[in-house]
Image (cartoon, rainbow, N blue to C red):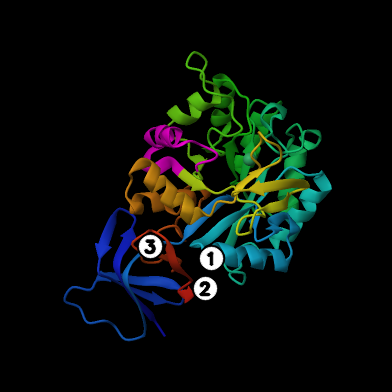
């Protein structure tokens, strides 16, 4: 049976449709029309009067939530995280690992591979993002220094094999020895490389991009500070129109003026909102695990000491809302930075990330305050609050 959705507005790739009628067949969008002058087709009718339908969000940098880390890679962890994400409007994510002993990373990748693409656990993990171990010791953030490693094709290949080819994104500091070679190798396998956790000068960042780097990891955070006479990695990230760039829009990691600078530089086709959420997301203040670390959360701020932020407790819908508030961008534009753009960057845009005929019916319903009302994944209601 087909499902028919009606609502006040619908955000499509380059437009907003008033009074939309969306026909869903077998979990896929079969037709989009406007209600004016048309009879509603037969089927199961769901009316979201007064609400806006946006693409379900896609978080390409997400470590965990609900007191679980994706590195646990158990059905219990993936289910708790997946349903938490779905309640917050997220339909897809890249399960993001962090720096850990090599055997622990390989075990997690092997475990995560079983869940990739599955719709049985709420939001769908579409691939894996490996954040570490190829990071700079100078910009490691909360990644343990003694576990960072020099990039090698051999170590990348062992991770690739453990993941059964499900690594879709890799954060790497381009100035490390062999980094360009490893970037080129990973890129040839379809992995998107994202420069970050990096102390690179501009020439080193450019070498990473020439080797194939495609995006930048949590812009501004764990990056060499911008200097107008030696602009470093940020000069490249902010001025290269071909590079996508992530940003954590929780108001703690990047202040609103810097969010505006990033937005003006990267624009509507290259800016990507992420959460970098860790296990404390969705939980009260307290102590939580991030990989092998203990992180203390106070007032929603996750830190390993007074100065080092350790992931976030942000939800992606909140990041979208913050971005709209900080920049004045309309919500449909803000939503694209957390749906269409990450899907394009990660190579899933023919399947998800926008509301169009032939795409998965992964839809978030938002109210007039831009809060999530509920989420439909493959046309089924999974995120009702
Ligand atoms: Zn990081």
Identify the secondary structure beneath mark 2: loop
Q: Earlier in the sequence, mark 3 or mark 2?
A: 3
Q: Is residue 36 visible?
A: yes
- Asked whether residue 305 is drawn in magenta, I would say no
- For discs 3 and 2, the disc positioned in front in the rendered view: 2
| Residue annotated with mark 1 | 86
Residue drawn at x 70%, y 28% as measured from the top left: 178
Q: Quadrant of residue 2?
A: bottom left
The outermost residue toward the left is: 37
Q: Which residues are magenta?
A: 251-271
Identify the secondary structure beneath mark 1: helix
Q: Residues within 10 Å of mark 3 (few under 14, many from 20)?
A: many
| Residue 25 image position (x, y, % from top left) | 41, 77
| Residue annotated with mark 3 | 355
Label pair 1/2, CB-CB below 8 angstroms: yes
Q: Which mark is residue 382?
A: 2
Q: Gap in Å between the C-alphas at discs 1 and 2?
A: 7 Å
- Does residue 239 sit above or below 383 in this rendering? above
Q: Gap in Å between the C-alphas at discs 3 and 2?
A: 18 Å
Q: Which mark is residue 314?
A: none
- For discs 1 and 3, the disc positioned in front in the rendered view: 1
Question: Along the horizontal axis of the image, is 304 left or right of 353?
Answer: right
- Asked whether residue 254 is drawn in magenta, I would say yes
Residue drawn at x 47%, y 58% as measured from the top left: 57
């Amino acid at each position: 049976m087909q499902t028919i959705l009606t609502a006040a507005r619908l955000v499509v790739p380059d437009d907003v449709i008033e009074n939309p009628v969306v026909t869903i067949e077998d979990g896929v969008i079969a037709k989009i029309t406007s209600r004016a002058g048309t009879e509603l087709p037969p089927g199961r009718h769901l009316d979201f009067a007064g609400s806006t339908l946006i693409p379900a969000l896609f978080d390409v940098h997400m470590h965990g939530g609900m007191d679980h880390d994706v590195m646990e890679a158990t059905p219990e962890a993936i289910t708790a995280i997946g349903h938490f994400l779905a309640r917050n409007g997220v339909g897809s994510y890249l399960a993001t690992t962090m720096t850990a002993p090599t055997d622990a990373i390989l075990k997690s990748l092997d475990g995560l591979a079983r869940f990739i693409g599955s719709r049985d656990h709420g939001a769908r993990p579409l691939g894996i993002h490996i954040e570490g171990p190829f990071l700079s010791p100078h910009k490691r953030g909360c990644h343990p220094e003694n576990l960072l490693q020099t990039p090698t094709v051999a170590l990348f290949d062992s991770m690739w094999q453990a993941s059964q080819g499900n690594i879709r994104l890799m954060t790497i500091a381009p100035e490390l020895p062999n980094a360009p070679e490893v970037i080129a190798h990973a890129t040839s396998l379809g992995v998107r490389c994202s420069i970050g956790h990096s102390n690179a000068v501009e020439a080193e960042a450019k070498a990473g991009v020439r080797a194939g780097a495609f995006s930048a990891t949590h812009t501004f955070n764990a990056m060499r500070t911008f200097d107008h006479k030696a602009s470093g990695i940020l000069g490249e990230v902010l001025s290269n129109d071909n590079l996508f760039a992530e940003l954590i829009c929780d108001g703690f990691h990047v202040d609103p003026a810097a969010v505006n600078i990033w937005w003006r530089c990267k624009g509507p086709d290259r800016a990507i909102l992420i959460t970098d959420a860790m296990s404390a997301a969705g939980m009260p203040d307290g102590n939580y695990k991030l990989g092998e670390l203990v992180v203390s959360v106070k007032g929603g701020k996750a830190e390993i000491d007074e100065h080092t932020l350790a992931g976030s407790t942000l939800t992606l819908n909140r990041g979208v809302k913050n971005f709209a508030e900080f920049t004045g961008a309309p919500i449909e534009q803000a939503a694209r930075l957390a749906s269409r753009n990450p899907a394009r960057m990660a190579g899933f845009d023919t399947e998800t990330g926008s509301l169009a005929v032939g795409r998965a019916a992964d839809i978030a319903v938002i109210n007039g305050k831009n809060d999530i009302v509920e989420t439909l994944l493959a046309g089924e209601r999974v995120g009702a609050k």
